[in-house]
């Protein structure tokens, strides 16, 4: 029986991974949360994992009390190092990384070093440290299986194809909640979180609203598929039925279609190369009637361009983009930054970033910290100064 460790099991992707594990009757060998220890304990009661991890050290005591009621009591790891310790355990057949933020890089690397394939839903792993992660995975013969619907689609479209014949990778975008809204000057947090097609957590929902999620996905696709940024394109596809496409040199285009349901790419990453009955509703093409595709409006959504810009700048620029965006979105969610200032904050940090050339993990960690501090200091007081 496949044994899966679910990192970030109490978040949006993590809870959907729990549904998949339950449906497929998978063995869950590890679970982690940042601070939602009650839900973690409920999941542990159902799946009886070997170990759990809690990222927020302040919640460790509560977690121990709740988990102590279980028999056998799972081992508990604490803190960011605890996530990596959990990911390294020999019990896992695969590690699904659904942690949000740069902290997800470390358990990805720990999983690789332990010899575990990784089902990757943590964008920052590749957006910030793609060169290091993919090289280490290659050296150790580890499979990085994308969970994002767009990259899962490309992965499926490329199966069995001759890479030299590849012409374009076409990432689709829903356009987010503001695709028909001209004035973005007074966007509220509630409006930004109201995605029309997908069920997602707050950070990725805001990224979709700014379309910075596509910039991050461009960088991820570059590393996942060893593709030049010049052949990675973005199209807006409102229906979220075509999850991405691949064009080949002869003009043939292969697309992957399915319902807007994250449980499908989660399941495929866990069961690859098998396909099993899934939880998502089957699509009725006749009922859909039409599928539409348009170019993104880069004037209203300049964030869509940041990924290509970061890859052109090179060096730490992708890591700075990822970290600056994480910091800016956090400020917005806390009511300290206007929605329309998120992308300018990210672009400014990128353009002021430094080192290029061969990067170490230490370089990336330093760039990540610098970018967060830069955005916090430059933009953290914007709303206060306006009030």
Image (cartoon, rainbow, N blue to C red):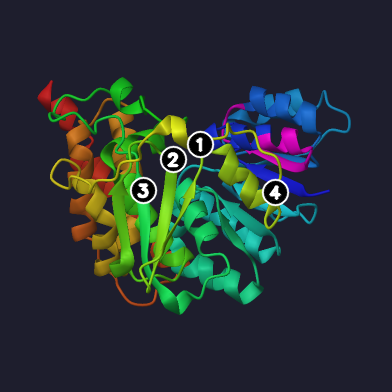
Residue 286 visible here: yes
Left or right: residue 380 versus residue 76 is left
Give the camera-side residue of 196 and 128.
196
Residue carrying label 1 = 259
| Sooner in the amino-acid sequence: mark 3 or mark 1 | 3
Q: Are marks 2 and 1 in contact (CB under 8 Å)?
A: yes
Query: Residue 211 location, x and y as percent?
Result: 29, 43
Give the camera-side residue of 356 and 19.
19
| Sooner in the amino-acid sequence: mark 2 or mark 3 | 3
Residue carrying label 2 = 241
Asked which secondary structure carries label 3, the reply is strand
Asked which secondary structure carries label 2, the reply is loop
Image quadrant assignment for residue 208: top left
Residue carrying label 3 = 172
Q: Are marks 3 and 1 in contact (CB under 8 Å)?
A: no
| Sooner in the amino-acid sequence: mark 2 or mark 1 | 2
Residue carrying label 4 = 86
Distance (Cα) linking label 2 and label 1: 6 Å
């Amino acid at each position: 029986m496949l044994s899966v460790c679910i990192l970030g099991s109490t978040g949006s992707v993590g809870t959907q991974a729990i549904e998949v594990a339950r449906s497929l009757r998978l063995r869950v060998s590890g679970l982690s949360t940042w601070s939602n220890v009650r839900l973690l304990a409920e999941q542990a009661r159902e799946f009886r994992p070997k170990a759990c991890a809690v990222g927020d050290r302040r919640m460790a005591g509560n977690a121990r009390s709740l988990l102590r009621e279980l028999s056998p009591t799972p081992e508990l790891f604490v803190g960011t190092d605890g996530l990596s310790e959990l990911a390294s355990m020999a019990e896992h057949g695969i590690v699904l990384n659904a942690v949000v933020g740069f902290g997800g890089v470390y358990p990805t690397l720990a999983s690789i070093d332990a010899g575990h394939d990784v089902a990757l839903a943590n964008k920052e792993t590749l957006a910030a440290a793609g060169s290091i992660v993919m090289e280490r995975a290659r050296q150790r013969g580890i499979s990085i299986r994308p969970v994002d619907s767009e990259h899962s689609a490309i992965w499926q479209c490329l199966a069995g194809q001759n890479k030299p014949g590849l012409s374009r990778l076409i990432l689709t975008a829903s356009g987010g909640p503001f695709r028909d809204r001209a004035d973005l000057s007074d966007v509220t947090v509630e409006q930004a979180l109201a995605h029309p097609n997908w069920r997602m957590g707050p950070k990725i929902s805001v990224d979709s609203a700014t379309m910075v999620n596509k910039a991050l996905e461009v960088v991820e696709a570059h590393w996942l598929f060893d593709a030049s940024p010049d052949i990675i394109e973005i199209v807006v596809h409102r229906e979220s039925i075509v999850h991405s496409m691949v064009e080949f040199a002869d003009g043939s285009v292969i697309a992957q279609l399915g319902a807007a349901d994250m449980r499908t790419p989660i399941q495929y990453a866990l069961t690859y190369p098998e396909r099993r009955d899934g939880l998502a509703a089957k699509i009725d093409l006749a009922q859909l009637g039409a599928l539409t595709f348009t170019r993104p409006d880069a004037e209203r959504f300049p964030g869509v361009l940041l990924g290509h810009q970061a890859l052109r700048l090179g060096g730490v620029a992708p890591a700075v983009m990822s970290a600056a965006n994480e910091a800016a979105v956090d400020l917005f969610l806390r009511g300290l930054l206007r929605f329309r200032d998120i992308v300018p904050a990210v672009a400014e940090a990128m353009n002021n970033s430094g080192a290029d050339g061969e990067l170490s993990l230490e370089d990336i960690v330093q760039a990540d910290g610098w970018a967060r501090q830069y955005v916090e200091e430059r933009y953290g007081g914007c709303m206060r100064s306006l009030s």
